[in-house]
Image (cartoon, coloured by chain):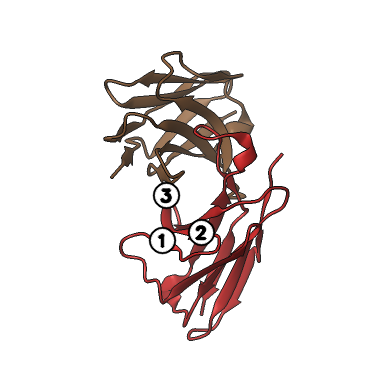
Amino acid sequence: AQTVTQSQPEMSVQEAETVTLSCTYDTSESDYYLFWYKQPPSRQMILVIRQEAYKQQNATENRFSVNFQKAAKSFSLKISDSQLGDAAMYFCAHKAAGNKLTFGGGTRVLVKP
Amino acid sequence: GAVVSQHPSRVICKSGTSVKIECRSLDFQATTMFWYRQFPKQSLMLMATSNEGSKATYEQGVEKDKFLINHASLTLSTLTVTSAHPEDSSFYICSARDPQQGAGNSPLHFGNGTRLTVT
């Protein structure tokens, strides 16, 4: 079974600064995918970024980037130039065969103006 | 882009009654849909995998007789909470993957969720 761990319940960042959210996972699969989802107060799940395990290059989406360390089973998310709209819950998720997503416990990001 | 519609967004029911939640894929056909449950300030927990034309697959600890899932068409899955009790009050979210977007890293599309309150 897969497990996903987010060790930071809450992170605070000053507007325009950078914050990094940690995520570690455990899996016996060799082929899998990793995602970061954002859940604002509306509770809509929004995909932030995705990473294929077979790719060594770290994924980047505008101000969002990941540091994928496969051997360490680590998948951190960096938010650069933080904006007020980035305030939300962020969930790290693992997907192996069958499309089942396993989520971490979430990290609440607070952005200070 | 692919959209998943979930209805209702909020429902309040009395203890002992049943509630049905619908999840529709609006512009794609989904042979598989997923139902999650999210308690306040907690993560999403997978309840079951809904399979079109066959029985749902339930996660360990989820009562299949209490949470009835029907996936009668390629665009609709329903979750019925039977004989609801206050402890069933939660946020329920469905999701589906558009098979046209390819396998693997194609993301799941989520509905907007249903907040169930059992009084």
Camera-side residue of B34 and B30: B30
Circle 2 sits in a helix, a strand or a loop, which is it? Answer: strand
Which residue type carries mark 1? Thr
Look at the numbered disc 3 and give the secondary structure of its residue: loop
Is residue A55 found left or right of B114 in the rendered image? left
Q: Find the distance from the CA under tag 1 to the CA under tag 3.
A: 20 Å
Please report whichever mark, 2 or 1, sits nearer to the chain's N-terminal start. 2
Near mark 2 (Cα within 10 A), the count class, few <14, some 14-19 or many ≥20, is: many
Identify the residue at horizontal 36%, vertical 31% (top origin): A23
Three-letter amino acid code of the residue under disc 3 = Ser
Residue that badge 2 annotates: B51
Chain B image colour: red
Q: Chain of mark 2?
A: B
State the image coordinates of residue A8 (x, y, percent, origin top left). 35, 35
Q: Name which of mark 2 and mark 3 comes first in the sequence.
A: 3
Determine whether label 2 and label 3 are within 8 Å by CB: no
Q: Upstream in the sequence, badge 1 or badge 3?
A: 3
Pointers 2 and 1 in contact (C-beta within 8 Å): yes
Evaluate whether label 1 is on the same chain as label 3.
yes
Whole-percent x and y of residue B79?
54, 68
**Mark 1 vs 3: CB contact within 8 A:** no
Q: Position of residue B45 (x, y in %)?
A: 41, 54
